[in-house]
Image (spheres, grey):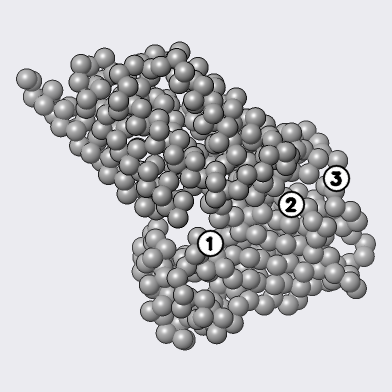
Amino acid sequence: MSQLSIIMKSIFKQSFHLLCYLLISASFTAVAHVNKLTKVEFSLLANHQYQLTLHADLLHLLSQQLSASSNAKNIDDDELIHRINELSIKELLKALSISKQHLKSNTLIYLEQQLLIIEDFQGPTLAEVKNLIARPAGNQGYPVTYIGRGKIPTTGTSVKISLPEVLGDTLLTISKPQQLLVAQGDISPNISLHNSSIPKSQLTQVISTSLMYGYQGFIHIIPKGLDHILFVLALFLLTAKFSTLLWQVSAFTVAHTITLALGIFGIVNISANIVEPLIALSIAYVAIENIFANNLKKWRVVVIFIFGLLHGLGFSSVLLELGLAPNQYIISLIAFNVGVEIAQITVLLIALLCLYRFQKKSWYRQRIIKPLSMVIALVASYWFFERLI
């Protein structure tokens, strides 16, 4: 065996072990379909007053300060909780004050071209924060609320809101109610003060909505949808021909498009407590079939179609959480679905790029298909019991 062959074999072996490690470790941290969008409510009050309510995660708000103080990046939640609990009362007060001032200074409300003043801005008290961090963090971290109030002149017809980047992507709810998705660091569309509808959309608004919801569909798979990534990879592993894989992915696409639409328009409504464990079970089933089946069975397309129906219900729960753009429901739905498909195709292309050169090797099934399928089955089984419990 040549030196180059030995080196290539070593690189491949180490890469394979790293992939297995990443899949297993990710299973203990990844939670599918959990949407951590910050929620903001804009309400019109009596006497030409407005109220802006920000529901955020304390860990998220303080992460930048705590990271900067230690010159560290990407601190995980457990470490953040530990550091917050180690802060003295004086240090915690300072951190809360800086965070509050940052939110107030970088929350901008425009009436036409006029910047409105946030006259009163209140956040959680020290006692509330100490009680909050004294208990374990839930799926949404440590939820805190900030409320800003001010006056709106009677002359204006619409407002736009720019929110601090630290909040990330934000779900903005208008008082009547009306929901808009505002990307991180972006500014909202014009919001009518006289009714709950957005002014008549132009081509630019259609394009903006398409890009926004397409992006949300994409990131729901990459990087947030590890369960869907594993399902697509499980389909890929046992499929030797790209045309056959295309048939399977097409069946999956058609199926999840059907239930995505039915879920969004309220025709089908199944609890996530049922859907999520079944999604994990579908991943485990396909992976286990990869281990024991030497060849694809014709009825696998039917099974994949059924599983696609389940995954579509999972997608619909996310899209319902985001909210559909007013007067552009179909565009939002299509764009989100297109984003999901582009992400799935991206996963397949990356997998094909990594494994194409090995697919015709005699050892491909024993060294690649079975071990990776076993890892996927273990991860999915863990998810199934976790979600079931």
Tell me which residue sits at (57%, 48%) in the image: 272
Which quadrant would residue 159 be assigned to in this image? bottom right
Q: Nearer the viewer, mark 2 or mark 3?
A: 2
Can you tell which quarter of the image residue 109 is in?
bottom right
State which tag comes first along the sequence, 1 or 2: 1
Q: Amino acid at mark 1?
A: Gln
Name which quarter of the figure residue 205 lies in.
Answer: top right
Image coordinates of residue 88 in percent, x first then y, are 42, 84
On the image, the x and y values in percent for residue 166 come to 55, 60
- Secondary structure beneath label 1: loop
Residue placed farthest to the right in the image? Answer: 155
Viewer can see residue 169:
yes
Residue 230 screen position, x and y as percent: 41, 36
Q: Which mark is residue 140?
A: 1
Note whether 201 is above or below 116 in the view shown.
above
Query: Quick one: SS at disc 2?
Result: strand
Give the distance between the C-alpha atoms of the residues marked 1 and 2, in whole angstroms. Answer: 20 Å
Q: Where is 142 relative to 268, above or below?
A: below
Q: Nearer the viewer, mark 1 or mark 2?
A: 1
